[in-house]
Amino acid sequence: MRCLDDDIVLGLIEGRLAVPILADVDDHLDRCPTCRDVVAQVARVQAPSHVLPRGHALGRYVIGDLLGTGAMGRVYSAWEPELDRRVALKVLVADGDGARERIVREAQAMAKLDHPNVVGVHEVGTSDDGVFVAMELVDGETLRAWAAQQRTWRQVASVLAEIALGLGAVHAAGVTHRDIKPDNIIVGSDGRTRLGDFGLARSGVAAPIAPATSLVLAAGTPATAIAGTPAYMAPEVLRGSSATAASDQFSFGVMAYEVLAGQRPFTGTSWKELLTTIETGAAPAIRTVPGWLDDLVRRCLAVEPGRRFPSMRAIAELIAAKSVQRSPAVMLGGVLAAAVLASGATLLIVRDKAVAPSCDLAGERALAATWNPAVRERLVSLDGRALAAIDRWATTWRTERVATCRAVTTQPAATIIARDRCLDQRHAELGALLARLEAPGASATAYRARIQDALAALPPPTECAAATTGSADPVPLDPVLAAIVREVLAELPAIRAANALGDSRPVLAVAASLVDRARTSSHAPTLAEALLAQAETLRGASQLADAHVAARDALAAAERGHDDAMAARAWIARVATAGDRRELVVAEDFGAVAAAAVDRAGAPPHLVATLLRLRGLVAYNRGLFTEATLLLTEAHARFVAIAGPRSLDVATIESALGSVARASGDLPAAERWHRNALAIDRDVRGGPHPDIARDLHNVAGVLRLRGDLTGAAAIYREALVIEEAIRGAGSVQGALTRNSLALIHMANLDWTAAREELVRARDLLIAAGHGDAAFAHHNLGLVEAAVGDHLLAMAHYELAAAVYASTIGDRALPAIRLVIDRARSEWRLGHRDALATTMRAQKLAREAGIEWIDQEATQLIALRRGAGFEAVSAVRAKTPSPVEIRTEPPIRGTTTNQPAAAEVPTPPEPPKPQPTRDVGAYGSTQPW
C-alpha cells in the first residue's frame, strides 16, 4: 500500500473507513513510521478542544462556521466587522515560539504576493488559539475535481498556463511553494485558475520527513526538512535536499501529467520505491495530447533539476505560443478570493475585493525596482526637462502595466503573457539607459544630454497593448539552448541603450558577439532580435553597407522563426537603412512591403506612424511632393495622438513637412513648419542639440531661397557650430550644412569659396558612404561650368549621375536638373548628344511638372533647330522671368568628330532663379 493520503488519514481518525481498507491501513502503519507521525499529529488537531465555537473573537474577526479541517489546522468562515466583509480564516497549530514565528514570517511573505493566479492573504496574526491567516474566498473547485470531468487538452493546457504564471510569480517573490498538487489548485467558477494552499500548517516538530500535507516557504527559512505530498515531490527533495523553484516545477510536472493522462507518472509503495521509479524509469508517453505538450511535461519531470525549464514563466510562454487556438478564459468581473484547506479545498463565494488596488500596487512595485527616489537623487544633475521626460516614460510604463494586470479578468492568458513580456523588455531597456546615465566617466555627461532622444528612440510602452504571442517559434526545450537564449535576450537592452544614446561604436564588438551566440541557440526569433540590434548599431556607427546586410538577415531570421512583430521591425530597419544610403527606389519598395508586415504584426501605433514618416521621406527625396505631404500629414496626426502636439516626434514630422513645402515652392508654409519645429525642440530640449541644428539649417534654407543670403549664411554657421560641437567635424549633417553654405557662395558668384566647401562636404560624405555625396559632385560640376571648365564639370556630372541612378532614381528633381545641366555643358563642348540630352530633360521635366527646366530645354532646342534668337526670344517672352542670353565661343580642344562650332548657336546661360529653382542641388537634412 502507498503512503496514506489526506482523505485516508482523516477517514481513519473520523472512523469512516470500510473494514477491508482499514485492515490495509493498519498493515501499512505497522511498517511506516512517517505515516504514524502524520496520523498522530492530525488526531491531535482533531481534538474537540481545538474547534472554535461560533461567535468566538479571534483578533478583529468573529468566527462563523467550521468549513474544513486539515492536517495542521482548521478553516472557518469569519466576519470582519470593521470592513463588513466575510473572509476565510485559517487557524494553524504551531508548537513552540520558533514555529509560531516561522509561520508568521511565511504568511507575511505570502501577503506580499500580488498576482491574479495566486490566492491572496489579507492578514496574519497570532493569538492564544494559534496563528491565524485571513484569506480571500473563491467559488470553484479543486483542479482534481475539475479534471474528473471530461476536458480537452486545450482546456487543460489553458489551466496549466495560468498555474505556471502564478507559480512563476511566487518564485519571483523569492518563495518556494513546496506542495504543488491538484488539491491545492482552484479552478474558479469564473474560469480563472489560482494557486492555492501554501501549506502554512507545517508542524513545528523537526523530522526527517514532515507530514504529507505540509511544506515550507523558502523566504528566509532554511528548508532542510522534506515536505509536501510525497507522490508529487521532486527526486532531490525525496533524497533530503532543500526544496527549490526547480522542485516546484517537478511537482507541477507530476500534477500536469496526472491531469492530462488520468494517472500519476510514477508509482511506489514507499518513498524509497517511488524515488527508485523516478530515477530509473521514464513515465509512459501521454498519447492523447500533442507531442509538444508531452515533451513539455517530460522536461518538467527531468531527474536533474538543471535539465528542467529555466522558469515557470518559460513554461507559460511555451504553452501560450503552442496553444494559439485555445479558448480564452473570460472572467466574470472582480477578483474572487480563495481559501484552501491543508487537506482538500473548501470554497465559498466572496466578491468583495476589486482588482484595481492590487494592480496599482504591483505597477508601483515593479517600476520602483528601476526608477525610484534614490535613483532620481543620483541623477540630480540632469536637466529638469530630462528628468520630466523619464517621469513621463515611467508613468506611461506603469499605466500599461496596471492595464495589463487588470486585463487578466477579460483577456486570454496568452495575451497577458505577451503584454507582460513586452513590458518586461521595455523595463529592462529603461534600466539599461539609467545604468549608463549613472556610469562614471566623461561619457556619462554626454549621455545625460541625449536622454530624451534615447527615450524617444526606444519602442514605447504603449506598443505593448497590441502585443500578441503570434506564431513565433517557442524557446528551445533543450536547457543548454534555452540558457543561451536567455543570456542573449538579457544583454540586448544594453546594446539598445547605447544605440539610443548615440554611442554605437563602442558596442559594435558586443553586438557582433551576441549575434554569434544567438546563432548557436538555433532559435530564429532570438537571432532576429540580435541581428536587428546589430543593424541599429552599425547604422549608428555609419557603417551603412554592413547595416544593410544585418537588417536583411534579421528579416530572414524573423520570417524563419515566424515572428511577425520582429519581421515588421526588420522591414522598417531596411527602409531606414536604404534611406540612409539614398537608395530611394529600393526604400520605396521596402516601404510598401513593410506596411503589410506592420499590419500583420497588429499595427502598433508607433510603428505605423514611424513607417509613415519614413515613406514620406522617401517620397520627398524622390521629388514626389504630393505623396510626401499626404504621408507626412498622416504621420503627424498619429504622433500627435500618441504623445501630444509638443513631442520630439511631432517636431521631426513638422521639420519634414517644412522641407517638402520648400521643395514645392511654398516658402511661407516651409518657414512656418521649420520655425514650429525649432520652437518645439528648443522648448523640450533646452540646450544645443543636433535637431536644433537641423531646424536652424532648414530655416536658413528658406531665407536663402528668399534672397536673404546674409541672414541665411549666419544661421547656417550657427547650425554648423552646434552640429560639429556635438557630433564632431566629420558628421554627415555637418557635411550637408557645408554643401548649403556652398550654395550661398554660388549665389554670390564666389566660386573659389564654394569649391572649398563642396570639396570638404564631398569627402566627408564619401567617407561615410552617404548617397548625398552626389549633391556635392553635382554642385562642383555647376561651379566648374560657371568658371568655363565644362570638361571638368562633365566629369563631376558623371559621378553625380551614377549615384543618383542607384539612390534617388531618374525622376527626382536633382536627377532631372542634372540632365539639363549636362545638356548645357554638352552644348558648350559641341557634343553631338547635346540635343538628345536636352530633349530628354524636357520630357522628364514635363512629366514631373518642373516648369523652369521645361522652359530652359525649350529654349535650347529652339536654338539647335535654327529658329534663331528671335524664336528663342518669343519663347522666353512667355516665361515668368526673362533672362539675358550671353554668347561665348566654344571651348577649345573639342574633338574633330563633333559638329563644327559655327554650326551650333551659342546656348543661353541658365535663367535667373525662379521661386522653385535653386542655384544648386542639396540633400535632405531629415533623419532616417
Image (cartoon, rainbow, N blue to C red):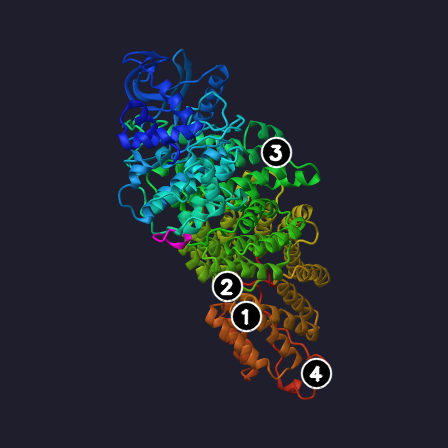
Q: Which numbered disc flags the more N-terminal residue, 1 or 4? A: 1
The amino acid pointed to by label 1 is Ile
Mark identifier at residue 894: 4
- Contact? badges 1 and 4 (CB < 8 Å): no
Label 3 Cα neighbours within 10 Å, binned few <14 / some 14-19 / many ≥20: some
Residue beneath label 1, please?
816
The amino acid pointed to by label 3 is Leu
- Contact? badges 3 and 4 (CB < 8 Å): no
Q: Looking at the image, which is closer to me, 923 or 37?
A: 37
Question: Under tag 2, what secondary structure?
Answer: loop
Q: Position of residue 176 (x, y in %)?
A: 48, 32
The amino acid pointed to by label 2 is Gly
Quadrant of residue 4 within the rendered picture: top left
Q: Is residue 94 above or below residue 185?
A: above
Label 2 Cα neighbours within 10 Å, binned few <14 / some 14-19 / many ≥20: many
Q: Position of residue 799 (x, y in %)?
A: 65, 70
Q: Is residue 761 left or right of residue 368?
A: right
Q: CA distance from mark 2 to mark 1?
A: 10 Å
Q: Which residues are magenta?
A: 286-292
Question: Under tag 3, what secondary structure?
Answer: loop
Q: Is residue 644 left or right of residue 704?
A: left
The amino acid pointed to by label 4 is Thr
Quadrant of residue 67 within the rendered picture: top left
Q: Looking at the image, which is closer to me, 7 or 78?
A: 7
Q: Looking at the image, which is closer to me, 716 or 384?
A: 384
Q: Position of residue 886 (x, y in %)?
A: 63, 73
Q: Which numbered disc flags the more N-terminal residue, 4 or 2? A: 2
Q: CA distance from mark 3 to mark 4?
A: 66 Å
Q: Overall secondary structure of the magenta stretch? A: loop
Q: Which residue is depicted at the point 60% across and 60% down?
A: 922
